[in-house]
Image (tube, coloured by chain):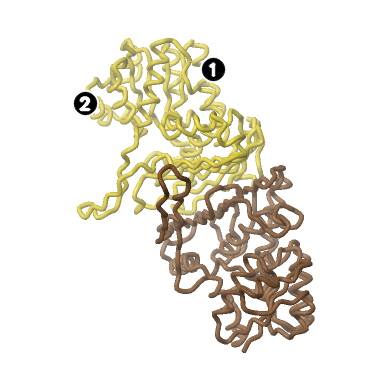
Chain colours: A brown, B yellow
Amino acid sequence: MLKVGLIGAGTMGRTHGSAYKQMPDVQLIGVCDVGPVEPKTFAEELQTRSFPSVEAMLDAGPQVVDICVPTPWHKECALAAAKAGCHVICEKPLARTLEDAREIITACETAGVKLFPAHVLRFFPQYATAKQLIDNGAIGKPAAVRTFRGDGFPQGFNDWYADFEKSGGLVLDMIIHDFDWLRWCFGPVERVFAKGLAARVHEHRDYALVTLRMRSGPIAHVEGTWTHPGGFEAKLEVVGDAGMIEFAGSATDPVHLRLRTEAGGPGGVPVPESPLEVDPYFAELRHFLDCLQSGAEPIVTPEDGYRALEISLAALESIQTGRVVTLSE
Amino acid sequence: MVRIGMMSFAHMHAGSYAACLNSLPNAQIVGIADDDEARGREMASRFNTQYFPSYEALLSAGIDAVVICSENARHKDMTLMAASAGKHVLCEKPLATNVIDAMAMISACKKAGVQLMTAFPCRFHPAMQRVKAMVESGKIGRILAIRGTNRGRNPGGWFTQLEKSGGGAVMDHTVHVTDLMRWLTGAEVVQVYAEIDNLINHADFDDVGFLTLELSDGTFGTLDSSWSRPKTYPFWGDVTLEIVGEDGVISMDMFSQNLVLYSDTQGAISWVNWGSNMDLGLTRAFVNAVENGTPVPITGEDGLKAVEVVQAAYRSADRKEPVKLPLEV
């Protein structure tokens, strides 16, 4: 039995928690949070126990600690877990700054524990299959890439997403997914130029347009929004010199539920679903735990987490300074 | 009745303009001149008009106005010729291949007391007209950002011969959406950044172009003007806009009104557009302005402003840094 302790009682904590419950070789020993309140109801939902603090949970001896709290708390949780000799699964972004990310990586190395940054997009079958097609030469040499990721403004603990200093806005919190996927497929980024609302004051709105020149040649355009009403959407297009791959987003959702409403009444909004045999979050966590047990190199390394963060921060720097930012990797 | 002469059918839009002019009750195509005599004669017969062996002969045939659809680099000479003959001009986009030529065209027409209109038909597409009305209604509040695309297949022919085209995809496809952004915001482009390369055809003309624009009212945007539709793509390309306002988002896909045709005889899947012909609105506006002596709705200055963005984009890509407008020429 692999003993896992979960930090964070939000949306991602719930997603990870339910995944662990489906793993017969995993024991979710408990949940805790960084806030002042012990997540008792949350623990009941997951049929596990709650702890009043991270320290209390670490005392109960988990082998793996999964960090699903807002970004500013990643470092203190990861350092405490590493110090307690626990392997660490950490939500993206690894940290708010490169210094903090490096400190987390070094602390895990020093403690001799594994660190898995949770860049889940690599486990979404449409993104994984797209990479496979690219690698197989299905579209020739990659040339132009466009990604879209968006939703309305996210609701989080204490509205922390709205605090730019904490969250870094959507460039750090959301389109880091696309940055990581781009780097996974096409290698390091040469330079970044971006415009976004992060440099302009707009309460509960964020939007960014980021152009990246990959060192291997392709030009990529990443669009991210936290100001699009109508639900989550993600899209992808990769053009090569011999073809093109398109993921048309929610247009590919196979199931739509439309409930009949009384004449003139509100509602009737279709609820789309894209069900999968294996949930990508489950696949990600399963992969991390399998690597832990086998000693195999994971699909996402700590360095990948660091480099994805570096791209996000470069985009933010470009947005704030109006300049082109060249990366060092 | 407005009597029109058509100068050159090098650009394929000429055929559509001719068909539209023939359908207007107040326009008559007096003749076609083309230095490709075979093409000129064929088009004259197709559009029930006369072939003229020279542009001079056409200009002295008692016409009121000309439609110029030559190769980009020849727009200037033909416009100057028409202006000195006292004819109003509707010129295919891009107005010119550089700012200096465009300025010369504007001043020649001004001096001759004739009107110069730039062929930006997208403004007349019913979808675009609807978008313009939505923006003006204030429904989405102040515009914060606009993400645009105008992508296509490589048209080949003179479009890829730089001495005739003045540039590849960025020259061909930047001006439409740039004009739409100016039209929607009423603001001018003040900064351009661009990543431009040839990554699909591996030749001496550009086929991938990602522009980032900053407008004088603080709106920012990006524009993909690549020839990035593969040969197997079911349609020639697209014009799309995502207009992000303070209170909502408008998405437009100008050419989505399609039937999908799966043809075993053609061995291909294609989209057959059933949307309205925007060239009709364009030609009607020009003919009416000439007939009534009223100002054309899209001027030479509008054409110039878009050309300036093109020139700035190439300069930015060369320098790998954003370029300020007005451009130093």
Q: Amino acid at mark 2?
A: Ser
- Callout 2 and callout 1 share a chain: yes
The residue wearing badge 1 is B107
Given residues A225 and A40, the one toward you in this image is: A40
Residue at the location (38% across, 19% down)?
A: B66
For mark 2, does the 10 Å Cα neighbourhood hold few (<14), some (14 to 19), or many (20 or more) residues? few
Left or right: residue B40 compared with residue B105: left
For mark 1, does the 10 Å Cα neighbourhood hold few (<14), some (14 to 19), or many (20 or more) residues? some
Residue at the location (40% across, 47% down)?
A: B153
The residue wearing badge 2 is B45
Left or right: residue A229 compared with residue A263: right
Q: Is residue A190 visible?
A: yes
Q: Is residue B316 above or below residue A75?
A: above
Which picture quadrant has residue B187? top right
Q: Residue B327: which disc? A: none
Q: Is residue B313 above or below residue A148?
A: above
